[in-house]
Image (cartoon, grey):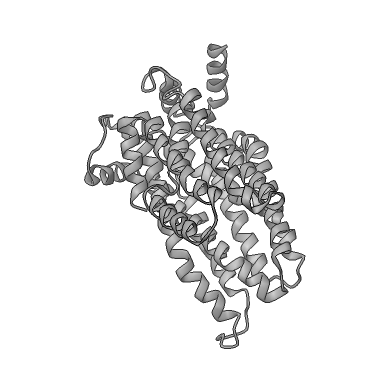
């Protein structure tokens, strides 16, 4: 919550690859401890070291990976790459689930530490600090060209970076005051952060209440939860890798964001009224909605600043997500327990899920306030750019 904006700020100063090396190296040690031995003393050592490392850099890998994509991928392709990044993460989660299911317990932590080490080596050897020699000039020419289009037409692409229009200096902001100024100079960025808060607040609340609700309402056990989570992961990864790039070219970034939020609101409302154990499985058809939200938010936010501020922006998004993840369980866990108990004010076991649906709806209403810019010749612009690249 506090460290992510700072890490993003440092990444803009010292380089994303340099900052990415730290959390990836630190991630090796906790699993290596339990991979070596799993007695009581080693467990306490694992717990203390992991807690300390998480305080410093939990979520840093995701934050810096998103900043790297935002810095090195052209604007028109960026949201698709955010989706690919999230899809690859979902696939890795599926592989980890199968590994934990079939590997012996003693081997799980050894495999985890080895895979973390391989990731560090791969990053140090193959990852370049920048894929473009001149990010602020040639790489962003498409942004400037799109910004000059003001005729009527389909409202697809979002407004271009306000900070670049205001000729903000690209040197690193070294104080919290300047980071606040970075946010205040872009209304769209503020709106994206508000959507991030309500989306993460809702999703974290769903994570803290959903399984509790299913166990109390329908008697779900660990096998039922495992099947449901595996189904959600598979549908989510497919939607992020294949469906998102197609839809974003058809309805645009804001359309993807609003669609995802509306789908999740409807899904939570259906779950709150669940009358049979098959209903949670049926609502997995709405899983692509939540998978569309954060790639869309990251794409929208990244368009509001130049390449030298991508670390700060993605750090702010990660900080807001962390804050929402902390707050949500304090709200929804007691609320779920109250309405599943005999002391509920009225009979509605899924009331907490209905509140989550309303929270998603607030994020949806905020998303439709994000303004678009007219771009009547957008398709011709993209075609011309593609011909130039060819």
Image coordinates of residue 300 in percent, x first then y, are: 46, 40
- Can you say whether 161 is above or below 45 in the image? above
- Can you say whether 54 is above or below 175 in the image? below
Question: In the orientation shown, which residue stands out farthest toward the bottom?
Answer: 343
Between 124 and 189, the one lying in front of the other is: 124
Image coordinates of residue 254 in percent, x first then y, are: 52, 43
In this view of the protein, can residue 73 be seen by the observer?
yes
Residue located at (52% from left, 21% from top): 381
Of the 4 image quadrants, the one containing the C terminus is top right
Total labels drawn: 0
Between 69 and 137, the one lying in front of the other is: 69
Between 100 and 167, the one lying in front of the other is: 100
* Lateral position of residue 119 relative to residue 188, left or right: right
- Can you say whether 186 is above or below 121 in the image? below
Q: Quadrant of residue 92?
A: top right
In this view of the protein, can residue 304 be seen by the observer?
no
* Lateral position of residue 381 relative to residue 14, left or right: right
Residue located at (56% from left, 74% from top): 336
Image coordinates of residue 347 in percent, x first then y, are: 62, 83
Image coordinates of residue 57 in percent, x first then y, are: 40, 47
Residue located at (58% from left, 80% from top): 339
Between 376 and 71, the one lying in front of the other is: 71
């Amino acid at each position: 919550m506090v460290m992510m904006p700072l890490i993003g700020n440092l990444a803009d100063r010292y380089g994303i690859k340099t900052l990415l090396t730290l959390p990836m190296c630190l991630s090796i040690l906790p699993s290596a401890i339990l991979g070596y031995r799993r007695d009581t003393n080693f467990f306490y050592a694992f717990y203390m070291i992991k807690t300390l490392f998480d305080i410093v850099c939990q979520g840093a890998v995701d934050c810096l990976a998103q900043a790297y994509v935002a810095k090195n991928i052209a604007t028109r392709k960026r949201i698709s790459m955010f989706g690919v990044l999230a899809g690859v993460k979902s696939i890795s989660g599926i592989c980890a689930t199968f590994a934990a299911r079939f590997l012996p317990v003693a081997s799980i932590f050894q495999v985890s530490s080895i895979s973390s080490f391989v990731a560090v080596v791969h990053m140090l050897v193959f990852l370049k600090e920048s894929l473009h020699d001149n990010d602020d000039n040639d790489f962003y020419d498409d942004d400037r060209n799109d910004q000059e289009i003001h005729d009527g037409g389909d409202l697809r692409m979002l407004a271009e970076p306000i900070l670049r229009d205001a000729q903000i200096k690209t040197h690193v902001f070294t104080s919290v005051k300047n980071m606040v100024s970075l946010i205040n100079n872009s209304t769209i960025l503020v709106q994206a952060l508000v959507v991030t808060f309500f989306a993460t607040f809702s999703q974290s609340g769903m994570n803290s209440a959903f399984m509790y609700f299913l166990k109390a309402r329908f008697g779900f056990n660990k096998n039922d939860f495992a099947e449901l989570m595996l189904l959600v992961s598979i549908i989510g990864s497919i939607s992020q890798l294949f469906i998102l790039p197609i839809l974003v070219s058809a309805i645009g970034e804001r359309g993807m964001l609003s669609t995802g939020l509306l789908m999740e609101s409807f899904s939570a409302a259906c779950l709150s009224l669940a009358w049979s154990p098959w209903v949670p499985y049926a609502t997995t058809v709405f899983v692509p909605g939540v998978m569309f939200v954060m790639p869309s938010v990251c794409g929208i936010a990244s368009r509001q600043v130049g390449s030298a501020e991508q670390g700060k922006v993605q750090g702010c998004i990660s900080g807001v997500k962390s804050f929402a993840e902390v707050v949500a369980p304090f709200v929804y866990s007691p609320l779920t327990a109250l309405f599943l108990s005999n002391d509920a004010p009225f009979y509605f076991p899924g009331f907490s899920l209905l509140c989550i649906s309303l929270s998603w709806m607030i994020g949806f209403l905020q998303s439709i306030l994000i303004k678009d810019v007219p771009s009547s010749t957008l398709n011709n612009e993209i075609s011309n750019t593609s011909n130039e690249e060819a």
